[in-house]
C-alpha cells in the first residue's frame, strides 16, 4: 500500500493502481524545495525506498553535481523521459540509478495555484522501458489530480 503525506492521502489508491498499471517500481509525488526534492507520496515495489519526507539534494549541493531527474523537470518546467540512464551521458551516475538501481524515468511538472512549479509526479523503473501514449496520459492524469488538490 502506498504511503503519502496528509495532503495527498486521498490519492493513495490512485498511485497504487498507477504503479501496477504501468508495471513500474515506483510512482512518486515530489515537492521542490530550495535545496532539495522531497517525497510527498510513494507507491510501487520501491515505496519504502522513498519514505515520506525523504529529501534528495539538488545538484548545487550534491557531491557529484549530478541533477536529480525530478530537479530537471522542475528546472525546465516540462516533462522528462529517460529510457535508460546507464546509456545516457547526461544521466549516468545519478542518485536514483546509483543508490536505488532505478535507471528509467518519466516525470511531469506539477504546478501550484500560482502557476509556479510545485514539484513532480513521476514513474521510475529498474529497466529500460518505453511508455505508451495511454501510459503517458495516465501519469498526466495523476498530475492533474495533484494540481486539483493544491488548488483547494
Image (cartoon, grey):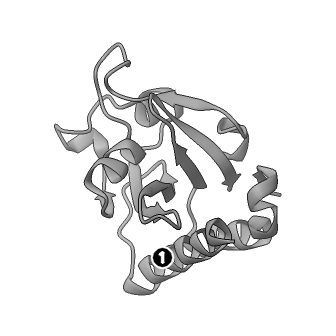
Placement of the C terminus among the 4 image quadrants: bottom right
Residue 125 percent coordinates (x, y): 49, 53
> Would residue 16 appear left or right of 136 to someone viewing this image?
right
For label 1, the residue is 140
| SS class, disc 1 | helix
Residue found at x 39% / y 52%? 104
Camera-nearest residue between 17 and 115: 115
Camera-nearest residue between 93 and 77: 77
Residue 26 percent coordinates (x, y): 59, 53
Residue found at x 47% / y 43%? 102
Name the quadrant containing residue 27.
Answer: bottom right
Placement of the N terminus among the 4 image quadrants: bottom right
Residue 89 percent coordinates (x, y): 16, 37
Mark 1 nearby-residue class (10 Å; few <14, some 14–19, many ≥20): some
Name the quadrant containing residue 50.
Answer: top right
Residue at the front extreme, as displayed: 114
> Would residue 132 appear left or right of 84 to someone viewing this image?
right
Q: Is residue 77 above or below residue 133?
A: above
Q: Is residue 68 visible?
A: yes
> Would residue 62 appear left or right of 51 to someone viewing this image?
left
Total marks in image: 1
Residue found at x 59% / y 55%? 29
Amino acid at each position: 500500500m502506498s504511503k503519502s503525506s496528509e495532503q495527498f492521502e486521498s490519492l493513495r489508491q490512485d498511485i497504487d493502481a498507477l504503479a501496477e498499471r504501468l508495471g513500474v517500481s515506483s510512482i512518486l509525488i515530489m515537492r521542490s524545495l530550495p535545496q532539495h526534492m522531497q517525497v510527498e507520496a510513494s507507491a510501487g515495489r520501491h515505496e519504502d525506498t522513498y519514505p515520506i519526507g525523504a529529501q534528495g539534494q539538488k545538484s548545487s549541493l550534491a557531491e557529484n553535481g549530478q541533477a536529480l531527474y525530478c530537479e530537471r523537470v522542475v528546472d525546465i518546467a516540462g516533462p522528462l523521459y529517460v529510457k535508460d540512464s546507464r546509456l545516457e551521458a547526461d544521466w549516468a551516475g545519478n542518485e536514483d540509478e546509483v543508490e536505488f538501481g532505478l535507471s528509467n524515468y518519466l516525470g511531469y511538472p506539477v504546478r501550484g495555484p500560482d502557476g509556479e512549479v510545485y514539484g513532480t509526479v513521476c514513474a521510475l523503473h529498474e529497466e529500460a522501458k518505453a511508455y505508451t501514449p495511454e501510459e503517458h496520459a495516465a501519469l498526466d492524469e495523476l498530475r492533474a489530480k495533484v494540481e486539483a488538490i493544491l488548488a483547494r
